[in-house]
Amino acid sequence: MQLVYSIPIDELIAAGFVAPFAELGAPFSYSARERRIRDLLDGYKAQTSAYMERVGGERLRSWFAGIPMDERVAIGHDLLGMYQGRKDWAAALAQRLAQWETGGALGLTEARLVT
């Protein structure tokens, strides 16, 4: 079997997924420790959402649009690891980044753009 796609951990967390943890081979799903981890992640997500709302999606998008596209593509691919496995990554990434120039509020999965 070969893994052909993986989802970055920060995107899983932003989507609300927290995997059961194990320590010394003993799972402790829904333990006090896992609840604490979930609470910390929920707090982080709430603060990140509040920050993005306070700055405003339209303002963030206009700042983003002010960065030259070639720089955005390089940052997205080289620093953020976007579209690493695609042969057409440059064109696909440029298209996706151009789409982010317009729209409303940003979601948590887009937090890497502003943090």
Image (spheres, helix red, strand yellow):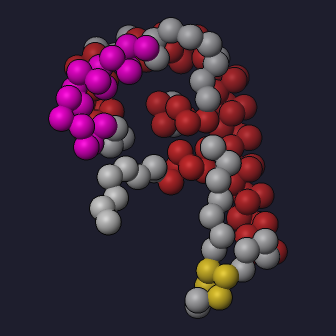
- Asked which quadrant contains residue 40, the reply is bottom right
- Quarter of the view holding residue 21: bottom right
Where is residue 65 drawn, in percent x and y? 40, 12
Instruction: Pick the quarter of the image with the N terminus.
Output: bottom left
Furthest residue in direction left, as rendered: 87
Q: Is residue 95 above or below residue 15?
A: above
Residue 97 falls left or right of residue 56 = left
Looking at the rendered structure, the number of numbered marks drawn on it comes to: 0
Residue at (77%, 66%) from the top-left corner? 36
Where is 75 relative to 36, above or below? above
Rendered residue at 71%/64% (across/down): 37
Look at 32% across and 43% down and name the residue there.
81
> Where, by quadrant of the figure, is residue 39 drawn?
bottom right
Magenta stretch: includes residue 55: no
- From this viewpoint, which residue is outermost toward the front? 1
Q: Where does residue 99 sit, x and y in percent of width and height?
A: 43, 14
Residue 41 as seen in the image, left or right of residue 102: right
Residue plotted at (61% across, 50% down): 13
| Left or right: residue 15 compared with residue 114 | right
**Residue 93 lies within the magenta run:** yes
Residue 22 visible in rendering: yes
Horizontal side of residue 45 vs 66, given as left or right: right
The image shows residue 62 at horizontal and vertical percentages of 48, 10
| Furthest residue in direction right, as rendered | 32
Percent x, y for residue 102?
50, 9
Magenta-colored segment: predominant secondary structure:
helix
Residue 79 showing in the rendered view: no
Q: Which residues are magenta?
A: 83-99
